Each structure stands twice: as C-alpha cells, then as structure tokens.
Image (tube, helix red, strand yellow):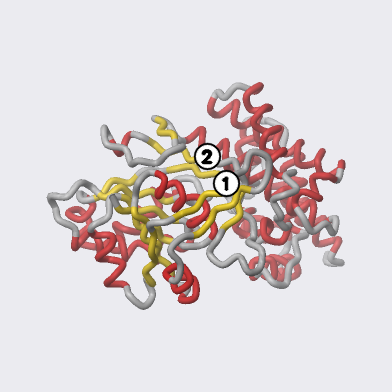
Amino acid sequence: MKAVHFGAGNIGRGFVGLLLRQGGYEVVFSDVADALVDAINAVDSYTVHEAGPGGTDHVVTGFRAVNSRTDPAGVAEEVSTADVVTTAVGPTVLRFVAPSIVAGLALRSPDAAPLQVMACENAIGATDLLRREVTAAAGADAEALLRRAVFANTAVDRIVPAQPPGAGVDVTVEPYFEWAIESGPFGDTPPSIPGAHFVGDLAPYIERKLFTVNTGHAATAYFGARAGIERISDALADPAIAVAVSAALEETSAVLAAEHGLDPLDLAAYRAAILDRFRNPELVDTVQRVGRQPLRKISRHERFVGPAAMAAERSLPTEALVAAIGAALAFDDPADEQSVELQELLRTEEAAAFTARTTGLEPEHPLFPHVRDAVAARQRDLGIG
C-alpha cells in the first residue's frame, strides 16, 4: 500500500505521515521546499518524539520525498499508483495541490480502486474545498477523473510546535492526537489508519475541535502576546489569561451544545483536557507561532467569529469571544505578514468598514456592533479616531 502526502512539514511528518506508516502504507511526501525534500531523502528514518506525560518515541521508516516544484511528473506518477492521498498544507494552498492530483488521476487505471483523498487541515470542509479545486483543475475531464477517487472530510488534532534548532527531520509533538474521518465515502473499504475513528456525521467533531482547541489555542496566544508573555504554557499560568480563555471556551461549548446536542458535562471535561494540553511545559510553543495569520483567524467561519456569530444568532453570550477578538486585533508581529497587514488596516480604515472587510459579518448581524466596538477600542489604543 502507498500513500502520497502533500506537505512534508512538521504536521506531515509528525502526525499524518506517522499514522499512515503505522497503518502499513509506504509514505511519499510531496513538497516544494528543496532543502526539506533533500533532507528527507538523505535519511533512512526519523523520530517522532512525544513530549509530556505518557509520551514515547516513534521511529519512522519506509518513506521518501518528491519535489512537486521541480518534478511534477514524478508526483503525478506517485499519485496514479497510490491508495491514499492526504494533505497538510493549509487551506489556501489546496488549489496548488489540485493539479497534481488531477494529473495523477489522469494516469490512473480506470480499473484501479478509487483513490482515497483526505485534506487534513484546520478548516471546516477542507476536503470539500480540495474536491472543488480538483474539479476546477480537471475542467472538461472532471466527471471522468472524479470517478477514480473518493473524498472524505476529516478533523485532525495534534499540537506540533516549532521545532528546536538542529532537529533535522525529527519532530517533537504532544502525546495526544485525534483524527476523525467521515466514513460514508469509503463504504466497506476504509483506509488503514490506526488510532483514527470513522464517524457517520463529522460536523460535531470538526466544530468541537475548531471551536475548542483552535479557539482556545489562539485565544491563549493573543492574550499572552498582549501581556508580553512568550510561551503558551506560561500564558495559561497567568490567572487572568486562564480565566479569559476559559470564559471564551464556555461560550463555544454553549454553542456546540445548542447546535449539535453535545452533552454539556462532556464538553466541560473536553475543555479541561484541552487546557491541560496547552499547559504542558515540555511542549515548547510560542504565542508568536500560534498567533500567526490573525486575519485568517478572525475571518467569518474561523475560530472566533464563527462560534460568536452562531452564539449571537441564538442570543447566547459572546462577551468573552469578543474579548478574544479584541486581543487578536492587538497582535503586532513584524515577522508575520498578516499581522503587519492587520495593523495597517486598523490605521487606515474606519471601524465598521474594517469589521465588514476582515470578519465577513453583515452590518445587520447581531454580532457586528460588538466586534465593531472592539475594533474601535483597538483604534483608540493606537491613537486613531
């Protein structure tokens, strides 16, 4: 069995690639970073180190890498004979992956079992997005080529921090992970992925993860950055930040209970477990890494505005989520392109226009005035208005 994984970074090697190898797949990493591809091909194994209580080391073998920038034909050939294709590249990069999948499907025998495609991204419906990109890239051949593949959405969860200098292709991760995969597209032949669980309805798992893990992680980063704290674990050691993050997650849990009928007691236990993961002192993670790309993280269906909008529509509390959005607006990291753009927009646009542009909320939406007021407060802090 063979799996092609797009994105040979830390998530790809330390989470997705690891589980695929444990499932018996030969793993072919595809990436555009020359040095990373060369480094992977220069070793016969790498180690995934789980940092924290219960952690262990996993030695990974049976992999290789192909450079999709310099050898697109090679990637297409690998896809054409693969059983599984996965991605961990970021939702905005999926459109660049799609042509390689199309080229591979064009070479694939119509008699072969359908290629099983899963986008392992921090986004709702990421595989649906990838399927749309594949359809667009295939053009007139889309109908025929898409019969050679099945696409399943997934929800993935594992914290993989920035790696220490000199680690090479080894990866440090947290011990905990979750990989939920919708079962319907696979019928009676699901992929072999130990530790993954297949579910009939993925929506509750995706939103529970996105609106708890991702919301809480980003909120910790933004409150921590505003307080001048460098590490995620240290930020949650600050009582005021811990209270603010917990309050935001209580609001997201109320939304999840209302939307999906999830048990409030189960959600409370889930929240507590998530916060304990963030407190892991052996997982050296920074507020700068977690807080990067703030414009994406305050967009309409992302981790703050998404649940806050759902809460506002149900007349549920949103104050703590809006406070987290306010902290995100203060994220000012010259090394992060979106942070620079965010601060420039705050200095050049009126509060309502900024809110509409960055959050996608309509002015009539019940959440809009609260976010607009948070924007105006940030602008006052900047001496604007």
For label 2, the SS is strand
Q: Which mark is residue 300?
A: none
Q: Which residue is mark 1?
A: 158
Q: Is residue 230 left or right of residue 103?
A: right
Q: Amino acid at mark 1?
A: Arg
Q: Which residue is mark 2?
A: 178
Q: Is residue 195 left or right of residue 183?
A: right
Residue at image point 68% right, 40% down: 53
The picture places residue 349, in percent across and down from the top left corner, at: 71, 66
Instruction: Tell whether label 2 touches label 1 (CB within 8 Å).
Output: yes
Q: Amino acid at mark 2?
A: Glu
For label 1, the SS is loop
Quadrant location, the C terminus? bottom right
The picture places residue 358, in percent across and down from the top left corner, at: 63, 58
The picture places residue 98, in percent across and down from the top left corner, at: 34, 62
Residue at image point 48% right, 40% down: 179
- Depth check: give the residue in front, 341 or 79: 79
- Depth check: give the residue in front, 218 or 186: 186
Residue 85 higher or lower than 199, as above or below: below
